[in-house]
Image: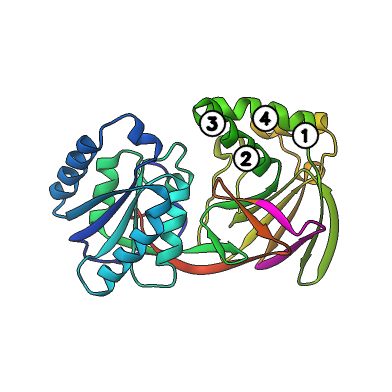
């Protein structure tokens, strides 16, 4: 099990009945038949004394399924809503359960599972079911931009550019995500898009021409063995990281330093810790990545933290 994040002591909630919403397109499901997963999960939850109603849902129907499950929870028919999938699936269900008393359980069935790792969840489905059965509920932060919630991070610039190109290649050539991302990366380096943006927050306003702005729901670590992880999930903070390099070569050198734990934040990044911020651009809409999925949003982009808006079932920190 990963190291549990720093959060307040949990509230213990009896979890005996859950609705389990599984994104049928999640990475783990390409390896197994739905019937096998249904049987394994039902047995895993039953082993811990939890009755699980398991529903496979196409990605575009996940929000509606979460809204139905929320109504069931409010009627007292279930104790928690569980989502199985990647970070995008978790974001969708979390946005429905935000600002309610209904706890969210997570089964890490995605490709990368950043949120599950930051939460300290085991990546084995049976062990994750045991965590859910234990019912240790913690309040953690959400963040949002123009009303769209995200659990991990949002970004503007090169990453959404690559995701759009990756998805185009996947649709055309039926490639896996990682295979499609390789040519998308090289195309990005050839064109190396840089955007003129204006970042405004309480007390300052600053123009930038940058290839990337990364907005974290709480702070991200840049040390070698903790790269891309968060230690705190409930500080009520946005962390903005604005990339300074102006050429493709400078950017590659920064990525090299980042991968080997030698990032020089003074040289490579401008970093801001904020509660809310506004990012303006000349374009009326920008592609914006939200937990790895891209949306086209109208400018200006208004970011804010939503402190402790989500109740999540997490491992006990002891």
Left or right of 75, for residue 265:
right
Q: Residue 164: which numbered mark, if any?
A: 2
Q: Position of residue 240 (x, y in %)?
A: 69, 55
Of tags 4 and 1, the one toward the viewer is 4
Whole-angstrom CA distance, mark 1 to mark 2, is 20 Å
First of labels 4, 2 by sequence position? 2
Whole-angstrom CA distance, mark 4 to mark 1, is 12 Å
Q: Are marks 3 and 4 in contact (CB under 8 Å)?
A: no
Whole-angstrom CA distance, mark 3 to mark 4, is 14 Å
Report which residue position mark 4 lands on.
Answer: 185
Whole-angstrom CA distance, mark 4 to mark 2, is 11 Å
Number of dots carrying numbers: 4
- Number of residues whose C-alpha sits closer than 10 Å to that of mark 4, classed few (under 14), some (14–19) or many (20 or more): some
First of labels 3, 2 by sequence position? 2
Tell me, yes or no, whether the highlighted magenta stretch contains residue 283.
yes
First of labels 4, 1 by sequence position? 4
Left or right of 124, for residue 265:
right
Quarter of the image for residue 94 reads bottom left
Report which residue position mark 3 lands on.
Answer: 170
Q: Residue, x 25% and y 57% (percent of image)?
A: 19
Q: Position of residue 210 (x, y in %)?
A: 80, 46
First of labels 3, 1 by sequence position? 3
Tell me, yes or no, whether the highlighted magenta stretch contains residue 90.
no
Q: Quadrant of the N terminus?
A: top left
Quarter of the image for residue 172 reads top right
Which residues are drawn in magenta? Answer: 275-287
Report which residue position mark 1 lands on.
Answer: 251
First of labels 1, 2 by sequence position? 2
At numbered mark 4, what does the secondary structure look like: helix, strand or loop?
Answer: helix
């Amino acid at each position: 099990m990963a190291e549990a994040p720093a959060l307040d002591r949990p509230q213990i909630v009896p979890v005996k009945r859950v609705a389990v919403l599984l994104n049928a397109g999640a990475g783990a499901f390409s390896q197994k038949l739905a019937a096998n997963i249904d049987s394994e999960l039902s047995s895993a939850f039953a082993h811990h004394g939890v009755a699980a109603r398991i529903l496979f849902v196409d990605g575009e129907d996940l929000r509606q399924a979460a809204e139905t499950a929320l109504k069931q929870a409010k009627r007292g028919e279930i104790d928690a809503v569980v989502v199985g999938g990647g970070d995008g699936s978790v974001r969708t269900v979390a946005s429905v359960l935000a600002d309610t008393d209904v706890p969210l359980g997570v089964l890490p069935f995605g490709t990368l599972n950043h949120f599950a790792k930051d939460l300290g969840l085991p990546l084995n489905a049976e062990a994750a079911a045991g965590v859910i059965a234990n019912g240790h509920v913690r309040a953690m932060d959400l963040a949002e931009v123009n009303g769209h919630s995200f659990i991990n991070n949002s970004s503007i610039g090169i990453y959404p550019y690559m995701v759009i190109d990756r998805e185009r290649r996947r649709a055309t050539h039926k490639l896996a995500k990682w295979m499609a991302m390789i040519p998308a990366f090289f195309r990005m380096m050839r064109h190396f898009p840089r955007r003129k943006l204006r970042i405004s927050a309480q007390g300052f306003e600053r123009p930038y021409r940058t290839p990337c702005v990364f907005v974290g729901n709480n702070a991200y670590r840049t040390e070698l063995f903790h790269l891309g992880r968060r230690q705190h999930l409930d500080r009520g903070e946005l962390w903005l990281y604005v990339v300074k390099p102006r050429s493709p070569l400078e950017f590659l050198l920064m990525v090299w330093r980042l991968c080997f734990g030698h990032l020089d934040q003074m040289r490579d990044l401008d970093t801001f810790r904020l509660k809310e911020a506004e990012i303006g651009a000349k374009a009326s809409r920008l592609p914006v990545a939200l937990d790895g999925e891209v949306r086209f949003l109208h400018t200006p982009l208004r970011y804010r933290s939503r402190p402790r808006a989500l109740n999540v079932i997490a491992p006990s920190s002891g």
